[in-house]
Each structure stands twice: as C-alpha cells, then as structure tokens.
Amino acid sequence: MRPPPARLDQNWPGLVGICRIERIRELNTCCERQVIYAITDLPQQAASAERLLELSRAHWGIENRSFRVKDGTFAEDACRVRSGNAPIALAHLRDCTLALLRRRGGKPKPAREAFAANPRAAIRAILTA
C-alpha cells in the first residue's frame, strides 16, 4: 500500500493509502484482466495485502450475491420508478420474490421466466410458501 498523493487528502479526509488490485478471470474462450484502485483509511499496520484483498472480496461478494442477481433477474437498473415510496416497495417485492425463488431451488432468472410464462404456477408458489 502506498501513501496517497497530497492532492487526494483534500478530497478524502482521513485517507491513509491507495492499493492496486489486479483481477484475472479465465473463461473458456478468453482471459480477462482488470486493474482497479482502492482507497483506505486503515493504518499501514492493519492494511496488509491479504486484508485489503479480503475487504475487497467481501464488498464485491455483496454486490454479486444481491444487487447483480436482482439486476440480472429483474432488470432492476433499468427500472425508471423514482418517486415516492414506489422504489423501495419494488425493491422489497424483488427481495421477497428472489427469496421465494431461491427457496424453491434452481436459478432465479430461468425461474422468473417460467413464472412469467405461467402466472398460475407463480400464484401457487406464493400460496404454498
């Protein structure tokens, strides 16, 4: 971990260091490489490479388990509902639906598509949950 340049201290009070994380993902047909930079307020002695990587993985684990799945299953990012209580109500409905789909087993997106094609099965699943 490197100390931050002086100009960054102005934008992020308490900033202690910057780290670089390189990710390599091997797929069947190609290999992807991604470099990201992260900032931290952890003191140098508490910010080992292993600890910073653990914190980064924990952060992205939440993103991948929840937000990415909801967006892939329900196209949440494309939703244009922005006013009143509707956005939070829709988010809760998506969370409940995702929990129901997970409880039944299988993948969320194909299950949602199957229920969209057969609304009666969706109603039965809700009533028997």
Image (cartoon, rainbow, N blue to C red):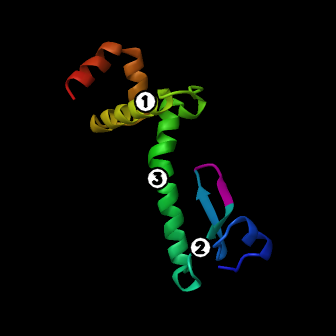
Mark sitting on residue 89:
1
Label 1 Cα crowd, 10 Å radius (few <14 / some 14-19 / many 20+)? few
Which amino acid, by three-letter code, is at mark 2?
Asp
Work out which quarter of the rendered image holds the N terminus and state it: bottom right
Q: Residue at x 41, y 18 (%)?
A: 116
Up the image or down, 54 lies above or below 45; here it is above
- Helix, strand or loop at label 3? It is helix
Question: Most extreme residue toward the right, as rendered?
Answer: 7
- Helix, strand or loop at label 1? It is helix
- Helix, strand or loop at label 2? It is loop
Q: Nearer the viewer, residue 117 or 36?
A: 36
- Over which residues does the magenta segment extend? 28-34
* Left or right, 76 with reference to 90: right
Mark sitting on residue 39:
none
Per the image, the residue denoted by label 2 is 41
Instruction: Quote the CA–CA distance across marks 3 and 2.
Output: 21 Å
Question: Quadrant location of residue 91?
Answer: top left
Question: Quadrant location of residue 124?
Answer: top left
Queried whether the magenta region covers residue 31, the answer comes back as yes
